[in-house]
Amino acid sequence: MSASALVALSPLDGRYHGKVAGLRDHFSEHGLIRSRVRVEVEWLKALAAEPTLAEIAPFSDATRAELDCIVAGFAPADSEAVKAIEARTNHDVKAMEYWLKGRLAHNAEVTKVSEFIHFACTSEDINNTSHALMLRDGRDAVLLPALDAVIERFRTLAHDLASLPMLSRTHGQPASPTTLGKEMANIAARLIRARASIAAVELTAKFNGAVGNYNAHLSAWPDFDWEAFNRRFVESLGLSFNPYTIQIEPHDAMAELFDAMARTNTILIDACRDIWMYISIGFFKQKLKDGEVGSSTMPHKVNPIDFENAEGNLGIANAVLRHFSDKLPISRMQRDLTDSTVLRNMGVGFGHMVLALDSCLRGLNKLEADPQRLAADLDDAWEVLAEPVQTVMRRFGIENPYEQLKAMTRGKAITREALQAFVATLAIPDSEKQRLLAMTPASYVGKAAELARRI
């Protein structure tokens, strides 16, 4: 660990910096400044390419290529230069505009129209579009691949363990058997649905000026269809255009994304706690790693630390994400600045979720089922076959089947012999009687294996 990591205030930039490195390119201060430069450059290119705006001469291929290179090659040193200007201006977007003008001062084509670099824009036009791009790219390039890896591991476990019987526990008590693979499939199915919700969020942007009415745009070109032009511009960036805003884009789409992420995290918390319990009762063992220590004083310990780490980070992520979705859609009148500092923490919410996904995946990759422990657990729970016995009794019209089995089994340990002796007395067809007598807790799993393999 480097000295800078050791003195970092946030563990995302300290202890865990390597595990969330992929997000840094999108959500760091450098990532934000680079996104702003991209938006400003694309806006200038769009204006220059519009024949109706005759006062802005079209750019040559060479100038367009240079503008594209500025965006593609924008480096941390460039961000530092922007920050140096901000130290004088005390305004981050204006500093970026000045830097861009200076960076292109040698280009005569751009110099002639340099005042159009930030034409008719409020800072929020640049910022909201930049934030939407950051969220989209961070989601698609980092978050979803990390989630996909976890889903795929649950799917693999579901298939590999599809036929391995397991005693269920409802309210912590023995219940109808399932298979270990089916329980993994349940988690996979929930995450697949949650993942679709995250991916489906259309991130929106506005580009309509100081209070959302194109006031400045129309003062310069009153007969030009700025709404249509700006819609095309926003959509050219791969974002959805929001035509109704105040000074800021209202962030409802952001809230939708953060809510979808938080719901996914809640599913993962549930999964981590269940797997923690399965490890605790011995259904799963954990693969050992040479040199690893489980306890500073108890040498035998192999702790489920990955699932505990994941659960903790999922909780932190949700605390941040839910604050985002509660706060960001709220702004006093046409604009207040409370969203600005909140939006600078988007990487924190993403970071703790990605860190949790990494921990969860590491934990899942260590799991090994223990068939003997699972079998022993089932063999101690013959009372769970009271359900199929009373259900067959219902089919053939035997009175009070539930009550008979309740009296026999509720709160009692039932042996195989006692249950089979009861079945032998039933007035049901012999073929059905033989089927019940052949049934064991391990065989009473319904369609669990089929469902597990289907995911």
Image: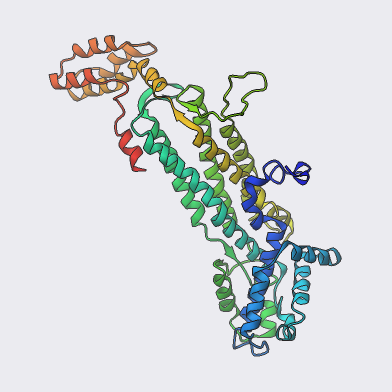
Q: 54 left or right of 289?
A: right
Determine the residue positioned at 53% across, 40% down.
361
Q: 371 left or right of 261?
A: left
Question: Between 32 and 201, which is closer to the camera in this rendering?
Answer: 32
Q: Is residue 311 above or below residue 119?
A: above
Determine the residue positioned at 58% across, 50% down.
258
Query: In the orientation shown, which residue stands out farthest toward the bottom?
Result: 54
Determine the residue positioned at 59% across, 31% down.
305
Query: In the orientation shown, which residue stands out farthest toward the right?
Result: 88
Q: Is residue 45 above or below residue 30?
A: below
Quadrant housing residue 387? top left
Question: Between 58 and 16, which is closer to the camera in this rendering?
Answer: 16
Q: Pinpoint residue 177: horizontal percent, then vertical percent.
A: 35, 25
Q: Pinpoint residue 440: horizontal percent, then vertical percent.
A: 28, 20
Which image quadrant: the C terminus?
Answer: top left
Total residue callouts? 0
Query: In the orientation shown, which residue stands out farthest toward the front?
Result: 290
Question: Between 68 and 143, which is closer to the camera in this rendering?
Answer: 68
Q: Pinpoint residue 12: horizontal percent, then vertical percent.
A: 68, 45
Which image quadrant: the N terminus?
Answer: top right
* Residue 247 at least partly seen: no
Determine the residue positioned at 65% across, 57% down.
25
Q: Is residue 395 above or below residue 11?
A: above
Q: Pinpoint residue 267: horizontal percent, then vertical percent.
A: 51, 40
Q: Is residue 297 above or below residue 75?
A: above
* Residue 183 at least partly seen: yes
Quadrant housing residue 426? top left
According to the image, what is the colour scheme of the structure?
A: rainbow
